[in-house]
Amino acid sequence: MSPLPFDQRDGLIWVDGTFVPWAEAKLHVLSHGLHYGSSVFEGERAYGGLIFKSTEHSERLRRSAEVLDFEIPYTVAEIDAAKALVLSKAGLSDAYIRPVAWRGSEMMGVSAQSNTIHLAIAAWDWPSYFKPEERMKGIRLDMAQYRRPDPATAPCHSKAAGLYMICTISKHAAERKGYADALMLDWQGRVAECTGANVFFTRDGAIHTPIADCFLDGITRRTVIDLAKRRGFEVVERRIMPDELSTFDECFITGTAAEVTPVSEIAAHRYTPATITATLMDDYMSEVRPKAQAA
Ligand SMILES: Cc1ncc(COP(=O)(O)O)c(C=O)c1O
């Protein structure tokens, strides 16, 4: 990846329906989205020039905004078309796509009933570095100090920028201690997810994952559950308490960015990435590749 800061790259960014030069895609400092967190986004990947589950991401983007009480002024089909255009105009094949929507500047207070809603879409080259042997070593996770909030406290089913504040703090703390990421518990002390990915465990051939009722039910999570079921694995969505962490055989995380990434350690607990993780890593990569290319 280029070492250039993200605001200084070459190319074009789609902003409110038109393409603007990358470095000029700016918003005013008095934007509601910046001050009050009225911003939602998506993280998507294209493989072989096609965005994986583009429509599901566009639907989630619009839903995320609705949860924050604003409507993105583009339909799902228009957002899908804009993302495809961004990708093709940039000539990208394996890429990351970042749509972001936010409230503008007309009013600067908690209330912002009539602020303009903006939408921007950027894409950049991001090959999927899939080196199975290396990945199978697994990443190390620490336990996060923050918990996923109670659904009565925060709009937890929105991919809202504001919900990432505790993720960045937790990830930074983990990285300072030499870990790759942190595992977050939920507001009731149950295992929830990582700072940007969902988590799965295996025990005696079955797959266990927390119920996604107070954190993002990832598109990758749902894809991997389907793939596992197609393979005949038992998948159990249930409450998982931290004292169970020592009883699992394998652990992996899933997300658009993480894809399927094996985990070797969560704080004091050790895991050995093995057959189930390797099978789902392979199946996921076959699933995301456009079918004509995969054949
Ligand atoms: C907090 C969090 N959980 C889970 C996920 C996984 O979601 P998805 O598989 O839709 O990328 C992400 C990534 O967007 C995330 O940021």
Image (cartoon, rainbow, N blue to C red):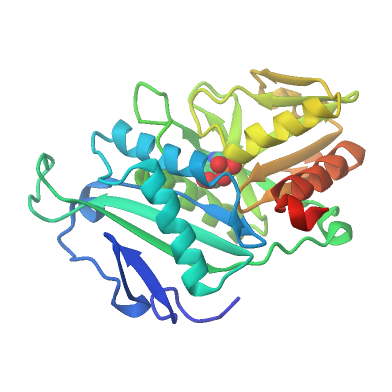
Q: How many marks?
A: 0
Quarter in which the N terminus is drawn = bottom right
Most foreground residue, 42 or 147 = 42
Left or right relative to 151: residue 205: right
Task: Please give the name of the residue rendered at 44% of the width and 73% of the height, measured from the top-left corner.
Answer: 6
Q: Looking at the picture, how far across and down is residue 293, in whole percent? A: 76, 58
Q: Quadrant of residue 29?
A: bottom left
For the question of whether residue 88 can be seen, the reply is yes
Q: Is residue 169 above or below residue 49?
A: above
Q: Is residue 28 above or below residue 209?
A: below
Q: Looking at the picture, how far across and down is residue 137, in whole percent? A: 85, 54
Task: Please give the name of the residue rendered at 40% of the width and 81% of the height, measured from the top-left corner.
Answer: 8
Left or right relative to 280: residue 86: left
Most foreground residue, 247 or 8 = 8
Q: Is residue 163 above or below residue 116?
A: above
Q: Which residue reaches farthest front?
A: 292
For the question of whether residue 144 can be seen, the reply is no
Most foreground residue, 119 or 194 = 119
Left or right relative to 247: residue 47: left
Q: Looking at the picture, how far across and down is residue 204, in whole percent? A: 90, 23
Indicate which quadrant contains ligand 1.
Answer: top right
Q: Is residue 251 above or below residue 96?
A: above
Task: Please give the name of the residue rendered at 81% of the width and 40% of the height, measured from the top-left corner.
Answer: 280
Task: Please give the name of the residue rendered at 52% of the width and 47% of the height, measured from the top-left corner.
Answer: 54
Q: Quadrant of residue 77?
A: top left
